[in-house]
Amino acid sequence: VQLQASGGGLVQAGGSLRLSCAASGGTFSSYAMAWFRQAPGKEREFVATISASGSRTTYADSVKGRCTISRDNAKDTVYLQMNTLKPEDTAVYYCAAAYYSGLSTWVTVLPHHYGYWGQGTLVTVSS
């Protein structure tokens, strides 16, 4: 599956952005989807994940309550709505897909479980 992330940009602290990730080349509804991010000089970190069915989500503590991950299986797209952005949210955001043939409620926060990655979209939050 190929993933194309978009929606990044420059925003002031306290603002909002919605990231999108369009998938192609696979059965989107068979993949758990996630967002990771990598800030300059730091390792890639987990942000949020959503199960293939969309019924289960998990968030990193750093974004819980400020971000919402969702998906539209009819449009083969996953979203990350980010509110009350902080300068420390500045990073390249990557979407990722993990195929799992079992429960459609399965989610994982481990990057090595995700076999497919998008190219990343830059989010810059100014103070």
Image (cartoon, rainbow, N blue to C red):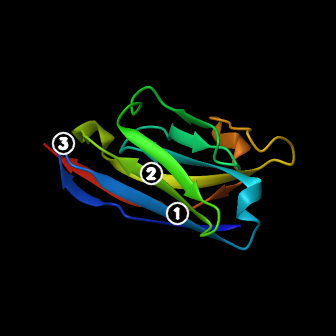
Q: Quadrant of the N terminus?
A: bottom right
Q: Relative to 16, does residue 108 appear above or below in the rendering? A: above
| First of labels 1, 2 by sequence position | 1
Residue annotated with mark 1: 21
Task: Please name whichever residue, 93 or 31, is drawn nearer the observer in this view of the structure.
Answer: 31
Task: Please name whichever residue, 76 or 110, is drawn nearer the observer in this view of the structure.
Answer: 76
Type of amino acid under label 3: Gly
Q: Position of residue 84 (x, y in %)?
A: 25, 40
Q: Are marks 1 and 3 in contact (CB under 8 Å)?
A: no
| First of labels 2, 3 by sequence position | 3
Q: Position of residue 45 (x, y in %)?
A: 50, 37
Residue at image position (82%, 40%) is 103
Spatial separation of the CA atoms under disc 1 and disc 3: 23 Å
Spatial separation of the CA atoms under disc 2 and disc 3: 16 Å
Residue annotated with mark 2: 80
Q: Mark 2: which secondary structure?
A: strand
Residue 11 lies left or right of residue 93; in this view the side is left
Type of amino acid under label 2: Leu
